[in-house]
């Protein structure tokens, strides 16, 4: 089972605090086994880390801190304006993007919370797994848990994006056909994700920016496809798919 890293549980804090090197399983998974406690009361954990997610989390936080640094003048003016309380202070403090990294001093002034920045850096790209099975290799624990997450994600995809429900069929053969089509669609989604190393939502969003324009002249009409951008070409090349033709349709006006 997965453990929440920010749960404030003593066992989780001890597991996170243990030193040791991570073992590389693949480019997206590094693991470290951690034992907390002794004897029958001991708990076995596997701390997993995704280096790409770690980098992404770090860059995202650095971007927020950079924006906050640029807001120093605004913070300074707010602090000078009124030390106890202002509506602008409350708005900034409760902001979903910036509020986490701001702290309010006893005199009411706002400061960048460097302690929170250091605390969040501990969790970059990491997740913690707890297991009661001592026979499993740490690598199998991490891969098994990741597979479970993928399965749960697959169910969410089928229910939401592929819309397996509501079902407007009554005959059994049609219901079976509907489910099989959704399953085939899910398989295609997973193939696309594995080949492109991107989520289906990202692929869908990037490819949806391809546009078809219809131009009408006195002599006829023509449909022209926009040129694929580098991100779209990268996806198409990874999937071994040729880009759409420049001209989809031309019809002279007789």
Image (cartoon, rainbow, N blue to C red):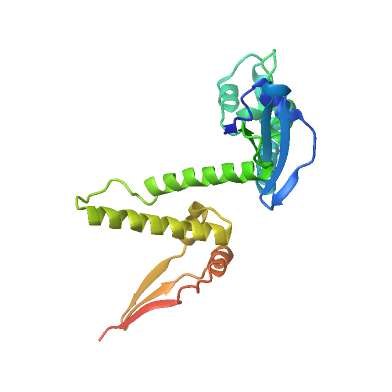
Q: Tell me if I can see residue 183 in this picture.
A: yes
Rendered view: 224 above or below 207: below
Describe residue 173's horizontal placement relative to residue 145 as left or right: left
x, y percent for residue 128: 64, 35
Who's the residue at 69% across and 13% down the image?
A: 107
Q: Nearer the viewer, residue 238 or 4?
A: 4
Look at the image and tell me in which quarter the C terminus lies. Answer: bottom left
> In which quadrant of the rendered view does residue 80 lie?
top right
x, y percent for residue 126: 66, 39
Rendered view: 172 above or below 68: below
Describe residue 118's horizontal placement relative to residue 245 as left or right: right
Describe residue 182's horizontal placement relative to residue 101 as left or right: left
Rendered view: 31 above or below 250: above
Who's the residue at 43% across and 48% down the image?
A: 157
x, y percent for residue 55: 69, 46
* Residue farthest toward the left in the current orientation of the protein: 170
Who's the residue at 46% across and 48% down the image?
A: 154
């Amino acid at each position: 089972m997965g453990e929440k890293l920010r749960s404030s549980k003593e066992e989780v804090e001890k597991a996170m605090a243990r030193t040791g090197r991570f073992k590389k399983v693949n480019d997206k998974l590094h693991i470290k086994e951690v034992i907390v406690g002794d004897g029958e009361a001991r708990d076995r954990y596997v701390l997993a880390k995704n280096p790409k997610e770690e980098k992404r989390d770090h860059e995202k936080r650095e971007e927020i801190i950079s924006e906050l640094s640029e807001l120093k003048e605004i913070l300074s003016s707010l602090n000078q304006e009124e030390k106890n309380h202002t509506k602008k202070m409350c708005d900034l403090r409760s902001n979903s993007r910036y509020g986490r990294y701001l702290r309010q001093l006893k005199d009411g002034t706002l400061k960048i919370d460097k302690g929170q920045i250091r605390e969040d850096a501990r969790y970059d790209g990491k997740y913690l797994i707890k297991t009661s099975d001592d026979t499993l290799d740490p690598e199998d624990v991490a891969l098994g848990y990741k597979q479970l997450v993928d399965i749960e994600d697959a169910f969410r995809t089928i229910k939401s994006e592929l819309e397996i429900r509501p079902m407007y069929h009554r005959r059994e053969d049609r219901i079976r056909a509907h489910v099989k089509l959704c399953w085939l669609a899910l398989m295609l989604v997973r193939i696309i994700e594995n080949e492109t190393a991107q989520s289906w939502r990202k692929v869908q969003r990037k490819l949806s920016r391809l546009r078809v324009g219809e131009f009408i002249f006195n002599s006829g009409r023509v449909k022209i496809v926009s040129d694929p951008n580098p991100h779209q070409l990268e996806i198409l090349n990874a999937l071994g798919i040729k880009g759409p033709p420049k001209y989809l349709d031309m019809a002279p006006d007789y």
